[in-house]
Image (cartoon, helix red, strand yellow):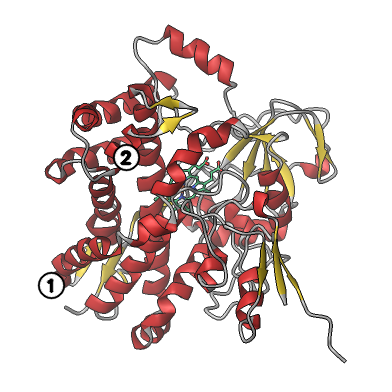
Amino acid sequence: MKIRIDKPACVGNARCAAVSAELFPLDDDGYIAVSEIAVPPGMEQLARRGARACPERIIVIEEDVAKS
Amino acid sequence: MTATLSPAVARPAHVPEAAVYDFDMFADPAYVADPHARVLDLLGKAPGVFWTPRNGGHWMLLSHEAIFNAARDVETFSSELMPLDKVEQMQKMMPRHVPLPLPICVDPPAHMKYRGPLNRVFGPKAINDLKDSIRTLAGELVDAIRPQGACDFMSAVAEPLPVQVFLKMLGLPVARMDDYRALVRAHLSDPTPNPMDSVKKLWRIVDTIKDVLEDRRANPQDDIISLLWQLDIDGKPTTMDDMENYCVVLFVAGLDTVMNGMGHGIRHLAQHPELQQELRANPALIGDATEELLRRYTFTVPPRIIGKDTVFAGLEMKRGERAMLFLPAADLDPKAFSHAERFDLKRENKTHIAFNAGPHRCLGSHLARVELQIVYEEMLKRLPLFRLDPAHPPSFHCGHVVGVDTLHLLWNP
Ligand code: HEM
């Protein structure tokens, strides 16, 4: 699973980091520090919740294509 | 507070009759009596975007979708209520610098020049370090009222706490607390029609702070005023005018708001003993409760000016017209939040816009959240079940900040 963030559109609500500071790193100003995050196994649920917490709706989750 | 309705002005020709709804955002009697009950009522009756003939005639944006879009379209919905060249002309006619509420009153891209330097100072990391001292202050205030069995929460806790936090952060002498509380009260007092009176209020704020500003310029300490002196603003070292601007905006935006947020939240808790019980039993839920109270009782109404002729939500809007982002309605909009009128600790969608959306998103949101949560925690920890005093029902005022004037509580000491 991947997280993609429209970084220039971040206005620093920091709600994603309130869900998981580990998954969503902020810069010193409190804005998102990265635009792409590879989600470690086991953290998928936190990733989804963090994305849903964004008031600017700029975080999208890319689910892995199911392996057959 | 009693308020009189402003006269209704004539509808401009480009505003269709169906888009008109008569609502006075300062004086509507039902709104002033119980603000959020009236907001819910409005959502059922008024269009999601309407024009009201009150207060000179202006647009009102109610729906979450409309406000979300408008807050991010800064060319159409401009924050430069007075164009910057006019501001400069006005400054030249004044005997001294008139403090400007930067960055609130400028649009991007210039906006970031003034906001950027403040972001780190008010970022989540910096604010986290203040938690312990805020908790100590809050605990002292609540302990002081506990033996009384009754209080006006607004004057006993909600007003002094943010003022004390502000003084500590800026490095202002706490011994002068009473002067600053008097300034807050003067600032909140009824506006007069004379704009010079508002300017004089700003000068009074500056006069009270000026000696400390001068001192920290020469003798930096571990406080925000000293930090601000060391910044680069638009590539230039901070000037005394910059410092006056920043101190005034922090004063105006940081005190009046937090205290009213606390008022709305504590009123809800006082009305809901079962919620107090749940949170006392499980204090870990108070963070979620703080967020849901912010949503349920969103209380600021940022103004905008239409920057260019446009068609928005199917309506023709003309350059120079005013529009209000009616955030209290956005966060109670049933299209955005299911059972929006319900206080729901387990609500799935927590993306309220009590701090607005877009580039002007509240700079102080991290501080405000910490102050609110700590007040709820300390009130619940240090007081037994508290309730509203039936002999003195709460009173409110409405406008750009929908605030609580008095909130009388009772408990068994
Ligand atoms: C619960 C408390 C608070 C609420 C509900 C609140 C709400 C808001 C809102 C809605 C805006 C956007 C205004 C606009 O779009 O025109 C804003 C901006 C701002 N707030 Fe707050 N605020 C609160 C507390 C604070 C505190 C404690 C501070 C002090 C640090 C603060 C400082 C500011 C500043 C400087 C801006 C301007 C930001 C900009 O224009 O970029 N606020 N606030």
What amino acid is labelled 2 in the image? Leu
Question: What label does residue B227 carry, if any?
Answer: 2
Q: Is residue B362 visible?
A: yes
Number of disc labels: 2
Question: What label does residue B179 carry, if any?
Answer: none
In the rendered image, the quadrant that contains the C terminus of chain A is bottom right
Residue B267 x/y as whole percent: 39, 66
Q: Secondary structure at mark 1?
A: helix
Name the residue at 25% across, 59% down. B157
Furthest-top residue in this view: B93
Tell which of B296 and B351 is nearer to you. Answer: B351
- Asked whether, in this view, residue B176 is left or right of residue A31, the answer is left
What amino acid is labelled 1 in the image? Pro
The vertical placement of B380 against B369, above or below, is below
Chain of the residue on which disc 2 is drawn = B
Tell which of B254 and B383 is nearer to you. Answer: B254
Residue B317 x/y as whole percent: 78, 33
- Asked whether, in this view, residue B40 is left or right of residue B159, the answer is right
Q: Residue tagged by mark 1?
A: B147
